[in-house]
Image (cartoon, helix red, strand yellow):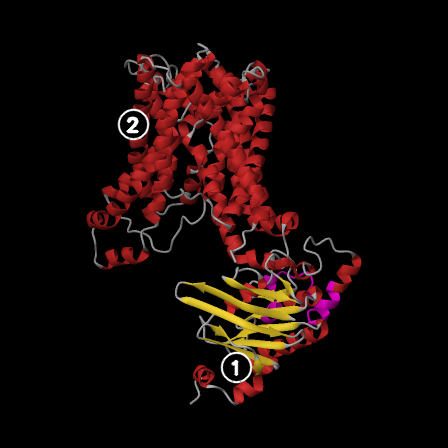
């Protein structure tokens, strides 16, 4: 007799996986069909080169600059250390348009830096171009890199630290025998993750890049669809982006462990905290990083607060649309990720695994272009801007949610799967009485991340939206592009507040439900 | 009648077969060295583990297509018999209705079952607020409500002290008597087998031997049982 399968539980998950695969693959097929045989011009290859250059530089700088910061956090104790580590998680949820706005306020034409330079009779600097794009990517990814590297520091086994201490290692030897091997292991993964993020970054390049010398593939796709209406070229570019980003993303996915949000950042045994100039260096690293991260945000706050009283009329409807899109995509993505994770916990399968991982290989604009091609024969794409945004956000946040939920679903299955089976607890009662209460915390956290990311995302919506479909990040970006900085900052404040409020509401809701 | 029809499970380096039957209402202890396959046998009967070959039949019907929750049996595990986020009453109520839509009459029955096992007044507690013995009692109360014709226990009281264990075994006997259930209890302790009474199925060399009256087997043990017991 053959082992029986458990078809009842797996069939819906497999159907769902099929739908998700279709959602990712159908646009790719449309791109392939439309984009093959397109010869890309010199400008397109320049975009490919610029994409790669800025991503590599951003990854290298973010990673290297994060090393001293992570080390300072790993070996120093000071009041507010925990809060600082928590705050380092925040830029992950910070909408990129807001970060750009803050950097403009500090490094832009009329920003603090140039005012200071002018006062000193020095020539002003420009933030536009390659260095501006890299600066913004470092701003957005330095905290992520710091947290990932800090994890590495904290994962050095206590036994080895004890051994080093008992042998009286000076800092140099500690570095050679404990820290350097850890960094060799951790840094490539960190750099690769950031490389992938920067390859598909759109909002930053939209504002700080542009022109023949600073256009990425994503931006070139956007321009081809939006301004030249050259869909064939957009499809060709999307194909290139897919190959480039897809390979890097899958490599990073295989190579790295999750960054670890929140918990487990303290341990009983700490590395020695050497005094003297090393102490001064640690302090300096922390202060400079703090200023680098805080100043742009403070600038947005200061510019935006007065503008709150006099918001452009487009802001509130856009905010409502954004919240709607964020809520719907967060709920759908969380539900889908949960179904896939539960199925995979019960019975690992390639089909489900692929559906949950494949979206990583794409980007918002790639999927967007494909969906644009698919929709256009049937309806004006603009009318479907918001549903398409929901779908794309769903697909893009799914891998992260799946990764958050899978270990929890596995533990649940391990601990209570048989008990629930033996009590005939299945379907809705199983969800209601077992899964939702036990997984409330990661579900809330994951939905919060998905909602905040979706709230702040500027990608596919820029391809599709007209005046009446604009989301809040698009409005912020448009106001920034029109140099209406006060209005942009005010709208950005609302955007940040809503993003974090959504994250907090889901996360706190999950924690309360779990308690 | 429970029928194990040349029931076999094999995997590299491991083989287990059982080919015997048991009448409703019998009390059977399953004893043997660790790793012999006692729990594997229960897992196959409960439907968690598909057998490599052979069948499990209840009253002549093959149970192969029946999912674990719909088989005519209740199983008590070594631990984790209660969901930690549900109250004692809810955990027990799952035995009546998995969707926990309990009527007033249902709730009254839950209360009675809890009182029956000595947990009156603890309805609203969470498992974390119970002692090990109390948690076992709650699981037995649920078994009472489920009233399935087979009650399987997989070393259920291994974590309890000897006195408490004897008490729980007595309770198992009472529950079995009230529901008329056939009891299959995995244990590694001959004292438990004796306390349960009934018969004993010894597991050795990949075979679950047909059950034999416990007193007889233990007072006049064949060599492999003697070796297990460690008496010379």
* Count of numbered tags: 2
Q: Is residue B196 visible?
A: yes
Q: Check the image and report above or below for B5 versus A52.
A: below
Residue B217 relative to residue A118: left or right: right
Numbered disc 1: what chain? Answer: B
Foreground residue among A510 and A200 = A200
Left or right placement of residue A213 versus residue A469 in this view: left
What is the x, y in percent for residue A100? 42, 23
Q: Which residue is mark 1?
A: B190
Q: Which label belongs to residue A57?
A: 2
Of circles 2 and 1, which is in front?
Answer: 1
| Residue B16 against residue B192 in the figure, above or below | above
A59 above or below A126? Answer: below
Looking at the image, which is closer to me, A209 or A44?
A: A44
Dot 1 crowding, Cα within 10 Å, few <14, some 14–19, many 20+: some
Which label belongs to residue A487? none
The answer to which of A52 and B12 lies nearer the viewer is B12
- Residue furthest to the right: B105
Left or right: residue A102 compared with residue A415: left
Q: Is A191 located above or below residue A389 in the figure? A: below
Reply yes or no: does residue B120 show up in magenta: yes
| Among the 4 quarters of the image, the one containing residue A269 | bottom left
What is the magenta range?
Answer: B110-136
Location of residue B89 in the rendering, given as x and y in whole percent from the top left corner: 69, 61
Residue A218: within the magenta?
Answer: no
Q: Residue A379 location, x and y as percent?
A: 58, 16
Secondary structure under tag 1 reads helix
Q: CA distance from mark 2 to mark 1?
A: 71 Å
- Residue A292 in view of the camera: no
Give the class, few, some or many, for how many residues have Cα within 10 Å of label 2's Cα (few <14, many ≥20): many
Q: Chain of mark 2?
A: A
Residue under disc 2 on the same chain as residue under disc 1: no
């Amino acid at each position: 007799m053959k082992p029986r399968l458990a078809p009842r539980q797996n069939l819906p998950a497999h159907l769902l996986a099929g739908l998700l695969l279709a959602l990712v693959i159908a646009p790719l097929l449309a791109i392939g069909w439309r984009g093959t045989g397109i010869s890309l011009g010199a400008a397109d290859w320049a975009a490919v080169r610029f994409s790669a250059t800025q991503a590599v530089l951003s990854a290298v700088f973010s990673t290297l600059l994060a090393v001293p910061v992570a080390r300072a956090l790993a070996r120093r104790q000071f009041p507010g250390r925990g809060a600082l580590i928590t705050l380092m998680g925040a830029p992950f949820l910070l909408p990129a348009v807001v970060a750009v706005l803050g950097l403009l306020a500090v490094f832009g034409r009329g920003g603090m830096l140039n005012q200071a330079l002018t006062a000193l009779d020095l020539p002003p600097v420009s933030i536009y171009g390659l260095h501006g794009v890299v600066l913004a990517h470092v701003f957005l990814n330095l905290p992520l890199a710091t947290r990932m590297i800090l994890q590495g520091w904290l994962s050095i086994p206590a036994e080895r630290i004890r051994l080093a201490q008992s042998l009286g290692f000076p800092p140099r030897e500690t570095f050679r025998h404990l820290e350097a091997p850890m960094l060799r292991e951790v840094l490539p993964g960190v750099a690769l993750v950031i490389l992938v993020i920067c390859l598909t970054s759109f909002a930053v390049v939209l504002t700080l890049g542009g022109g023949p010398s600073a256009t990425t593939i994503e931006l070139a796709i956007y321009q081809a669809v939006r301004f030249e209406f050259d869909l064939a070229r957009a499809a060709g570019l999307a194909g290139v982006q897919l190959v480039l980003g897809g390979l890097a993303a899958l490599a990073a996915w295989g190579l790295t462990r999750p960054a670890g949000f929140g918990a487990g950042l303290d341990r009983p045994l700490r590395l020695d905290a050497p005094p003297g100039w090393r102490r001064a260096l640690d302090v300096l690293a922390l202060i400079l990083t703090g200023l680098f991260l805080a100043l742009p945000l403070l600038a947005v706050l200061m510019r935006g607060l007065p503008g709150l009283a006099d918001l452009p009329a487009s802001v509130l409807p856009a905010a409502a649309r954004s919240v709607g899109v964020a809520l719907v995509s967060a709920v759908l993505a969380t539900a889908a990720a949960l179904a896939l994770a539960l199925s995979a916990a019960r019975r690992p399968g390639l089909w489900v695994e692929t559906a949950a991982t494949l979206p990583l290989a794409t980007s918002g604009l790639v999927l967007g272009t494909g969906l644009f091609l698919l929709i256009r024969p049937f309806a004006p794409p603009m009318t479907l801007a918001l549903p398409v945004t929901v779908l794309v956000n769903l697909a893009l946040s799914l891998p992260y949610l799946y990764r958050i939920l899978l270990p929890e679903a596995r533990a649940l299955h391990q601990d209570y799967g048989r008990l629930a089976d033996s009590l005939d607890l299945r379907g809705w009662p199983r969800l209601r009485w077992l899964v939702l209460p036990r997984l409330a915390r990661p579900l809330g956290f994951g939905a919060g991340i998905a909602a905040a990311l979706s709230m702040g995302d500027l990608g596919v919506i820029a391809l599709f939206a007209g005046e009446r479909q604009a989301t809040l990040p698009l409005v912020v970006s448009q106001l920034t592009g029109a140099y209406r900085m006060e209005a942009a900052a005010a709208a950005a404040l609302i955007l940040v507040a809503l993003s974090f409020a959504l994250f907090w509401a889901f996360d706190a809701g999950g924690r309360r439900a779990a308690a | 009648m429970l029928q194990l029809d040349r029931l076999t499970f094999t995997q590299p380096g491991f083989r287990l077969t059982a080919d015997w039957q048991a009448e409703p209402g019998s009390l059977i202890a399953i004893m043997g060295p660790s790793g012999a396959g006692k729990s594997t046998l229960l897992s196959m009967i409960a439907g968690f583990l598909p057998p490599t070959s052979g069948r499990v039949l209840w009253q002549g019907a093959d149970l192969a297509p029946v999912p674990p929750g719909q088989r005519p049996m209740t199983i008590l595990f070594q631990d984790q018999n209660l969901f930690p986020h549900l109250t004692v009453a809810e955990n027990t109520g799952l035995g009546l209705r998995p969707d926990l839509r309990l009527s007033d009459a249902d709730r009254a029955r839950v209360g009675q079952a809890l009182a029956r096992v000595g947990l009156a007044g603890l309805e609203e507690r969470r498992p974390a607020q119970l002692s090990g013995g109390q948690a076992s009692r709650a699981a037995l109360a649920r078994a009472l409500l489920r009233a399935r014709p087979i009650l399987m226990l997989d070393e259920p009281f291994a974590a309890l002290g000897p006195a408490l264990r004897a008490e729980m075994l007595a309770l198992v006997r009472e529950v079995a008597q009230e529901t008329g259930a056939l009891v299959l209890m995995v244990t590694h302790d001959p004292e438990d087998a004796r306390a349960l009474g009934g018969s004993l199925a010894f597991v050795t060399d990949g075979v679950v031997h047909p059950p034999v009256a416990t007193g007889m087997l233990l007072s006049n043990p064949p060599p492999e049982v003697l070796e297990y017991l460690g008496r010379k």
